[in-house]
Image (tube, rainbow, N blue to C red):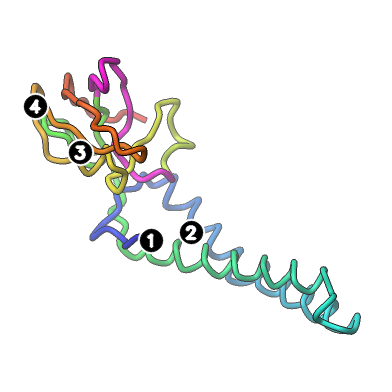
Amino acid sequence: MSTQPESTWLTQETFDRLSDELAHLSTTRRQEIAREIQEAREDGDLKENAGYHAAKDEQGKIEARIRELEGMLKTAVVGEAPEASGVVELGTVVTATIAGREQKFLFADPELESQTELRVFSPDSPLGQAIEGLKIGATTSYAAPNGNDIDVKIVDVETFRG
C-alpha cells in the first residue's frame, strides 16, 4: 500500500482538473452508481446477479479514486515549477543516463503527464527514490522490479516550462 507524500507539486491546471474530477465523483457519479446498485438489487438473487457485482466493483473503484484525490489535493503545492538549481527535485526536468541510455523526463506526480510530452517519473518510483536530491554529475543505481541493478547518472536538471 503506497503512502501519500508530504506534498505534491501540481500546476494550477492539474489542480483544477483533479478538483473537478473529485467534485464529479463525489456527487454525480456516487449518485449514479448508488442508483445502478439499487436497480440491480431489485433484479433478484444477488449471488448470481452480474450487474449488481459489476456495480459494486465500480463503486469500490470510485471510492478509492475519491480517497486518492482527496489525499493528493490536501497536500498539493500549487504553482509554477521550481527554478532548477542543479538538484533533482519535484517539478524539474531531468536528463539522465539510465542503463547506458540518455533519457529526459519530468520528475513529478504522474497526474502531470497530461501537461507534457515528456515521460513522467514519480518520486515514489524506484528511479524517483534513487535520484531525488542528486546533483548534476551524481551517479547512483536502483533495483529494477526484476531485481537487476540499474545504473543512473544525472546529466542535467532544468526548470519545467510546461
Sequence order check: which comes first, mark 4 or mark 2? Answer: 2
Within-10-Å neighbours for mark 3: few <14, some 14–19, many 20+ = some
Compute the Cα span from label 1 to label 2: 7 Å
- Image quadrant assignment for residue 39: bottom right
Residue ID for mark 3: 82
Within-10-Å neighbours for mark 2: few <14, some 14–19, many 20+ = some
Which one is closest to the eye, mark 3 or mark 4?
4
Compute the Cα span from label 2 to label 3: 22 Å
Q: Are marks 4 and 1 in contact (CB under 8 Å)?
A: no
Q: Secondary structure at mark 4?
A: loop
- Image quadrant assignment for residue 46: bottom right
Instruction: Residue 138: give its label.
Output: 4
Is residue 134 shown in magenta? no
Sequence order check: which comes first, mark 4 or mark 1? Answer: 1
Instruction: Say what amino acid the circle numbered 4 marks.
Output: Ala
Return the residue nearer the eye: 82 or 104. Answer: 104
Q: Are marks 1 and 2 in contact (CB under 8 Å)?
A: yes
Sequence order check: which comes first, mark 2 or mark 3? Answer: 2
Return the residue nearer the eye: 97 or 112. Answer: 97
Residue ID for mark 1: 73
Compute the Cα span from label 1 to label 3: 19 Å
Instruction: Say what amino acid the circle numbered 1 marks.
Output: Leu
